[in-house]
Image (cartoon, rainbow, N blue to C red):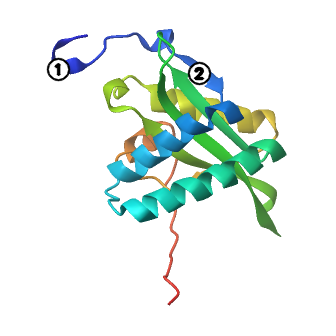
Amino acid sequence: MRPGGSLHVRKSEFLIRLATSRDLPALRRQRDGMFRDMGWTDEPALRAADLAYARWARARLRSGRFAAFLALSPDGRVAAGGAVWLREQQPGPRRCGLLPYLLSMYTEPEFRGKGLATRIVRAAEAWCRKRGLTKMTLHASRMGRGVYRKLGWERTWEMETLLR
């Protein structure tokens, strides 16, 4: 370890691989870390979201509509991760079928700044291209926007409302 606790490891020493259902605990832990980094502090809400996500992700992994990618450190620890959900979209002039949605991107604090998020996004994009998909979407946190911009992602405009 270098001073300050950061581990010096070359990018090429990390393995990027597809996750399996056995990796769900790591995916859940990383998703929880993502929400906490975004400022969520409501413990009951975080626990409820985690349990719902576990059921949701497991079902979609089985159906083939969800793929998760993990970056493993040289000693086998999960350093980063992200996932793609193949969402159905309504037909339109420029769209039909499945629309990949990138989600749950997270890098463990000690591994940040090593390009792992970039490698995960590229792996997800390649996975989608291999399936003939031509467009992806995501909702980026402030922390992640730079990664996506560098990779050529463009900001779009969506609106939302809370239904009371």
| Mark in the foreground, 2 or 1 | 1
| The furthest residue to the left | 3
Q: Residue at x 47, y 32 (%)?
A: 117
> Tag 1: Cα neighbours inside 10 Å, few (<14), some, or many (≥20)?
few
- In percent of width and height, residue 93 lies at 80, 67
Which residue position is annotated with label 1? 4
Q: Is residue 43 above or below residue 143?
A: below
Q: Secondary structure at mark 1?
A: helix
- In percent of width and height, residue 158 lies at 52, 70
Asked where in the image residue 62 lies, by quadrant, the reply is top right
Q: Residue at x 57, y 28 (%)?
A: 70
The quadrant in which the N terminus is found is top left
Q: Is residue 34 above or below residue 21?
A: below
> Tag 2: Cα neighbours inside 10 Å, few (<14), some, or many (≥20)?
many
Which residue position is annotated with label 2? 16
Foreground residue among 121 and 135? 121
Q: Residue at x 32, y 59 (%)?
A: 41
Q: In the drawing, does residue 75 fall left or right of residue 59?
A: left
Q: Secondary structure at mark 2?
A: strand
Residue 105 visible (yes or no): no
Q: Which badge, 2 or 1, comes first in the chain's sequence?
A: 1
